[in-house]
Amino acid sequence: MKNLVDKNAALPAILLLVLLVACTESSNGGQVDAGGKSNQDNDAGIISDPFNHKERVDLFWGPAPDLETRMYVFDEIWETLAEEYPGFTVSELDWDEVRSTYRPQMELATSYGRFYAVLSHMVAELRDSRVFISSDYICGQLHYHPRQAERPPFFHLWDKTSVIGACATSMPDDRLLVYSTEAGNPAGLEPGDFILGYDGRTWRQNLEIIDREQMPVCGLNRTVDSAYDYNRMNVAVNNAHLFQSMEVLKKGASSPESINTDRLIGYESDFICSDQVGVDAVDPPYTSFSDLSYSPDASWGILSGTNIGYICNFNSSYLYTAVEKLLDTDGLIIDQRLSWGSSSFGAALSMLFNETHDQVIGYVKRLNEDDYFKVNFEGVEWRNLLADVDKNTFYDHPIAVLQGTKAASGGDEFPYYMSLHPYARRFGRVTNGGFLADEGTWVGEGINFTYAGRQAIGSDLNFLQEDDVTPEEQVWLDPDDVANGIDTVVEAALAWIEEENSNK
């Protein structure tokens, strides 16, 4: 069922508001007390939803296709995955039970919002960034939403840009640390501020509402569990349209303030959220998604007062050029915490390595349509970027690779390859874990569906989807550092390189 087009052609946390004040009121009358308990929690532990998202989903998006069409779309997508998806080997998800759960919901989905919500939640059961569904009507473009001012009821799961011009990263206590902002952003946020939640509730509590109401989902899932949770936390900045007030703790303040979301929802920024504070010596390749089509995807330079090269890599096309320019350095920091993907980094690897490695990454398909859990190891297709390296070049100084959960596809693969380099060390968080490959698409009734048909394996035939590419040094942005314009992950990498060089 590859490349199908349908006949009509026609997506208990540590509560965080432990503040010095007794409570703060949101515009809908909600309160959070000093212990972090919302007055919208009842004795049964169910959080109320003043916006009544479920009803709005049914009213806002208009009527669904007729019953025959709805069931046709559902069955085509479910059966395509049942016959070709190889990732069940890792997830061990009961795909038949998923069908039993969601097919009756599709029969009752009389609104277009509910029709798409059922599909997006069914696909999300796979927890795979390579299995992706969207609706042209509901999702629009992923990096921003042109109907945001209408407060459309959908869950905005895209985390690589911010519609309010401010980027945040989740802390262990579930506060969201603002680390990068666009000048003039409507919330007046600055690096070092914290976003606490919406409508008098923590963001994690609001996620419970979004999940319970089965909102339509627009955006990519993450594969590794910790990356999945991190992604859902960080998209708080893109979901102000679902709430009336945002609670913020400003840098240095002792009590939070409440911001009316009417100030935020019409801004429609596409400000890049890279999980980087950055360095003085090198500007990022671009700062807005709209610059993507005509800007280089990497930038590079020498860190001030050192002979250490720094590469800010958002893709791979310019990575070869960056490495070539920085070969005569005493160390390299390759920062790819935001990586859109692409496997065009083979030439860069060739300059960095001088030893070949056979069968690093290969791809396998399902053995047959009837067994969800068997793949064809005899038909493995090896795609090895280290089979033929340039023996005339070799980088024999420390290489720090900075990684994070926004690195996917090629962003997963690059640090995996670099783990084989004798002088490399990885810093940051786990990557996405999206070690599958796109296989085909299905289009119909405004639905765009892309699925994975190949599973990645390593040289020992292990499934790389199970490998979360955990860095040797797990370090992330620190609130005090961010407030002072310091990138904690870069500083850790720089300290390691200097120590390695001093020990030579």
Image (tube, grey):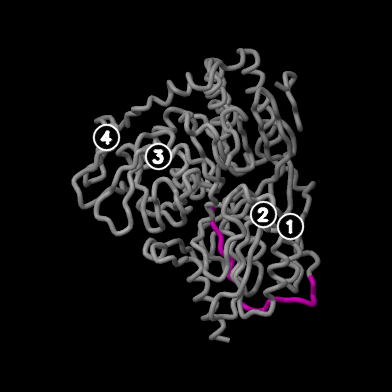
Mark 1 residue element: loop
Spatial CA distance of label 1 from label 4 is: 50 Å
Spatial CA distance of label 3 from label 1 is: 41 Å
Q: Please name which of the two marks, 3 or 2, marks the residue nearer to the observer.
A: 3
432, 32: nearer the viewer: 32
Mark 3 residue element: helix
**Disc 4 marks which residue?**
30
Magenta part of the protein: which range?
390-405
In magenta stretch: residue 402: yes
Q: Residue at x 44, y 48 (%)?
A: 185
Q: Using the rendered image of the protein, determine whether residue 218 is visible from the camera's viewpoint.
A: yes
**Amino acid type, residue under disc 1 in the picture:** Ser
Q: Are marks 2 and 1 in contact (CB under 8 Å)?
A: yes
Q: Closer to the N terminus: mark 2 or mark 4?
A: 4
Mark 4 residue element: loop
Spatial CA distance of label 3 from label 2 is: 37 Å
340, 256: nearer the viewer: 256
**Disc 3 marks which residue?**
263
Residue 128 position, x and y percent, is 59, 42
Q: Closer to the N terminus: mark 3 or mark 2?
A: 3
Q: Residues within 10 Å of mark 2 (few under 14, many from 20)?
A: many
Spatial CA distance of label 2 from label 4 is: 44 Å
Q: Closer to the N terminus: mark 4 or mark 3?
A: 4
**Disc 2 marks which residue?**
410
**Disc 1 marks which residue?**
344
**Amino acid type, residue under disc 3 in the picture:** Arg
Q: Residue at x 46, y 61 (%)?
A: 476
**Amino acid type, residue under disc 2 in the picture:** Gly
Residue 463 position, x and y percent, is 65, 50
